[in-house]
Amino acid sequence: MSIKNKAAIIAVLGASGSGKSTFVKQYLASAKPKRLLVWDFMREYKMGSDVTRLSDLSERLQSGAGFSLTFRPSADESTRAAQFDVFCGLALAAKNLTLVVEELRFVTTPSRAPMRWAQVTMTGRHAGLRVIGTSQRPASIDKDFLGNATLIHTGRLVYPEDTRAVSKAMRVPESEIDALAPLDWLEKDMQSGKKAKGRITF
Amino acid sequence: MTDFNALTSEAAAVDAAADAQTAPPPEAEPVTGEAQSDQVLSPEAEARGVIDLALSLAAPFFPSLDKIYTEETKDRLAKSAAPLLVKYNISLLIAKWKEEIEFAFVAAPLVLQTVRAVQSDRAARAKASADADKAAAEPAVQKSA
């Protein structure tokens, strides 16, 4: 079994064009979760049903045993922040699902995480949540998420502060991350310490 | 643990806010010095910054743009552009080229003023030269008459 199939919290990091979305989509195609919920700020996921209202999302989550739902949040920053908190609450209430949050930079900062997102990352495992969070600027996202990740997968990074943040979270030398070519990836199981390297193929 | 019943009214309230979205964006506190270089801008703020920059550079050349790009128009444009800035990593360019952008802000109006001043000086010199030629020609005409 691949290490990513056991992880409960997966951080998928890398600069734009490094293959984050491709990795997540390939992972989902392989894992085939019966209950999938996606926070799709970037409008990159075309799987299952698109939902733009939380009330509809709540109904859908309660109505079926299996689902594949993609929530498209507002472009307005304050509205999106409120949506994200409730979205995380609904994921916790639904239990036993795979949750994908695309680009954490727009809903968290290094020093601030919405309360229910913190619950997702800290106690979601007990509710049967498998969480996948992505970011192209890991130095600008919730530090606790990286700290709680059971698997960190990173592609090429552009900014030194991002390399430093990921190096620290993964406990690998910065040079190992700097050496990544476009579409190369490095991942580490944070529980076993096992590392793997590869290259995204399409 | 959170349950659906507790979230129902909250979800409806957030949906209503999303539907309305009438509240103007909050005014950002001015940031200076070290804090400015460390600041993480939201994509909307970055998009708005690019729009403001482009318009401020173009305004001296095309004053009519102010009538087209009202504050409301610029806000709407920034909100819709934000996901694209992220998708194509343009937001990173703003941080990367911060010094160049600030230089352009200062230099562009100066360049315009310089061009206009040079044109004005040249026109004045040409007029003075023409006047002198005309003055020199007049006595000759009178003599020949």
Image: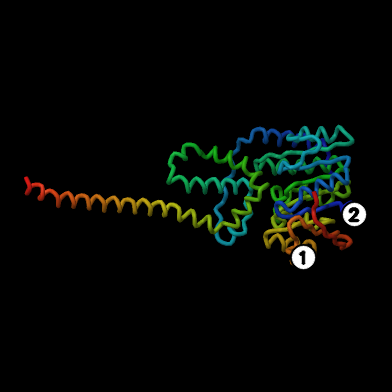
Say which residue appears at 66% left-offset and 41% top-offset: A75
x and y percentages locating residue A108 in the rendered image:
71, 50
Is A189 placed above or below B75 here? below
The residue where tag 2 is placed is A2
The residue where tag 1 is placed is A176
In the shown orientation, is residue B12 left or right of residue B104? right
Query: At numbered mark 2, what does the secondary structure look like: helix, strand or loop?
Result: loop
Residue A119 visible from this viewpoint: no
The chain letter for the residue carrying disc 1 is A
**Count of numbered badges drawn on the protein:** 2
Q: Residue furthest front?
A: B144
Which of the pair A65/B77 is nearer the observer? B77
In the shown orientation, is residue B108 left or right of residue B34? left
Q: Residue furthest right?
A: A1
Say which residue appears at 86% left-offset and 43% top-offset: A97
Query: At numbered mark 1, what does the secondary structure look like: helix, strand or loop?
Result: helix
